[in-house]
Amino acid sequence: MTHNPDLTSSVIFGLGWLYLLLSLMNIWWTARIMKTDPHRDREAALWGAYSGLLFMAALAHLTGSSSPQHFHIRMPNFIKEFIDLGAAPVPYFTLTMVLFIGVVVLRKWFVKETVGWVLLNLSVLFLTLSMTDYDFRQIVGKPDNVPIVSMLFIVGFFTWLYFKRAVDNDERRAAGRPLFEQEKNDKILVWPDLVYSELICMVVTTVVLVAWALLLPAPLEEPASSAQTPNPSKAPWYFLGLQEMLVYFDPWMAGVVLPSMILVGLMAIPYIDFNKLGNGYYTFNERKFAILTFMFGFLPLWVGMIILGTFLRGPNWNFFGIYEPWDAHKLEVLNNVNLSEYFWIYWLQARIPTAPAGADEFTKIIYILQREWLGLLLCLFYLAVVPFLLAATIFRSFAVKMGFIRFIVFSNLLLFMASLPIKMVLRWSFSLKYIVGIPEWFFNI
Amino acid sequence: MASVGDYIRGSQIWKSIFRHPAPIDRRNRIVVMLTNFFLHLHPVSIKQQGIALSYTWCMGGITFFLFLAETVTGVLLMFYYRPTLEHAFNDILALRDVTTLGVMREMHRWGAHAMVITVWLHMYRVFLTGSYKPPREFNWVVGVLLLVLTLLLSFTGYLLPWDQLAIWAITVGSNMARATPFLGHEGPGFQLLNIGGFDLITNASDARFILLGGRFVGEMTLNRFYILHCVAIPLVVALLIAIHFWRIRKDGGISQPL
């Protein structure tokens, strides 16, 4: 698997600073444990030893005592091969869903400070060790991808922080104690308390921005040339979730209808959510459905698909493992089948209805409708009948509280959101291309 | 030194700007909030938990500050950069290699990326604390519009360096407009818009053409995106930010029922 240029001294030196940072972070953590609770001395000793180990790793990197070819602190090959082996959309989405459900179900355990700290350490170590791989460096080290890596940590941290506060408040509620936000909630003067913390925030933001700008040059590639199409051609990173949807939907759905629905759906949230609880404090138990729906949309579907589109999609929009070289000749078998083909050819063993040559426009339309009637009916059923089925079953209480129009809007938005995972699962399990496939009218769903 | 400070604070000029003594006692800490144009965005007093960093995450504030930083660095870049096929790339190249304070481009680009992330996190926090609930429904809608405009600002700015990264990202992004229902020449239903068998929507009149000012990403696109990026969108954003902030005050703070 040594197909690539190996480590260079400057990469090793750079990683040394990361290890040093991680070591300092853990020294701080050790000190924090010793200060807060003298009885946890064994735990503190463990963290201290770990910090020492990291410090030695940092020294080994920073002194540059061995040549890059013989450098040993790197991601083991068997782990790389194992991860690349499972590199495909299905394992990826399964993993994100397992993570998402795991965090929600095990939230009481997840919000423990030690658990959070261990997870942070593991993810930073994983990133640092992965940086010793050439192909990983090529994609993660791209200047425009650096913000995405930091976004991962930031989003993870704030999700952790939310659950910590929410679990705490839910426990307070269960025990009949006042919520965290209601304790010590006196009115205080904006000058100095708010004005000064705003000032500090501005100074910190400026320092971070200037340091970032000085350390990392902005990308500038070859001059624009409409003759040379790069492979892959990618949209700006924040739109890569939408570009990833192109795998499952045609541009008019992935690029126009679904983004519009996302925006309309976001704007509709305050008018749909009739739950009066949870205004002005963190909670999970009091608004489970709202939180889960929003988080599902934000974490696996938005952030998760940006990660997928940025780091895992290579030439020809093929899926590549994080340590896999981007081979433009990688072949992925694509023989996706339309629902109409399933219906006429596989099930009825008949020919697909095709208008005879030279038929007039009206006859052509009739033939198209005859060919696609099942898919059209399914889509109509999905948007027009399923809301009523939902209202009669699992969302009965919602429908009663929301009223007719509100519920129809809500259920249709929800169904549009669900259409993406549904189409994904259909693609993976049945190689389904289009439910309705009318390329004559650019109308493919 | 104290006497110099006293002399300045006692001068007519100082008093004409700040019409009260330094905010070191309770009375003047209240007065400063009422008399200062910039501070009057804020109330005089506020609930303690409403400003706790672990509650607000400060993401909205950082987003606004980044918008200001983008404005300042952006204006400086506008002094230097010329949005034409002849100059665009070379100006950016010069910013990187020779121009004093060319680092403004880095600050502008990284600030833009950071702003996208902080807007998302601000929305995440507002959702998780239920702060969009009555009476703040409309302000959430304004916030969603600001989110869209932030993404569009970033998107239009992405083209300006005029390198391979820029034009192909914009090409991929704007290709979607070709498939707009009814208004794109490869979108469903565009055939319905024709008069006497003559299509109104072609590749020289559809949504993508309007966006790009041409059939492909070219000089007119650069011009359009430059104007959108530097003038049109920032003006709308500034207006919406003003409404957003004003509504926070009128709706009774950042969260909690009235």
Image (cartoon, coloured by chain):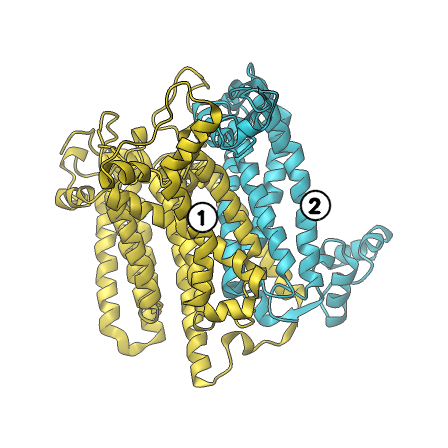
Name the residue beneath numbered marker 1.
Answer: A380
Residue A5 appears in which quarter of the rendering? top left
User: Is residue A203 visible in this depiction of the protein?
Assistant: no
User: Is residue B235 visible in this depiction of the protein?
Assistant: yes
| Colour chosen for chain A | yellow
In the picture, measured across the screen, residue A177 lies left or right of residue B251, that is left
Query: Is residue A138 placed above or below B120 in the rendered structure?
Result: above
Can you give x and y, in whole percent of width and height, for residue B7 in the image? 80, 55
Q: Residue furthest right?
A: B12
Residue placed most toward the observer, B248 or B71: B248
Q: Amino acid at mark 2?
A: Leu
Q: Amino acid at mark 1?
A: Leu
Residue sitting at x 30%, y 77%: A38
Q: CA distance from mark 1 to mark 2?
A: 41 Å
User: What is the crowding at mark 2: few (fewer than 14 residues within 10 Å), some, or many (at least 20)?
Assistant: few
User: What is the crowding at mark 1: few (fewer than 14 residues within 10 Å), some, or many (at least 20)?
Assistant: few
In the picture, measured across the screen, residue A97 lies left or right of residue B6, that is left
Residue placed most toward the observer, A200 or B53: B53
Assign a secondary structure to mark 2: helix
- Are the two marked residues, 1 and 2, in contact with CB atoms closer than 8 angstroms? no
In the picture, measured across the screen, residue A261 lies left or right of residue A78, that is right
In the image, which disc is placed on residue B239? 2
Residue placed most toward the observer, A27 or A185: A185
Can you give x and y, in whole percent of width and height, for residue A132 in the image? 23, 39
| Colour chosen for chain B | cyan
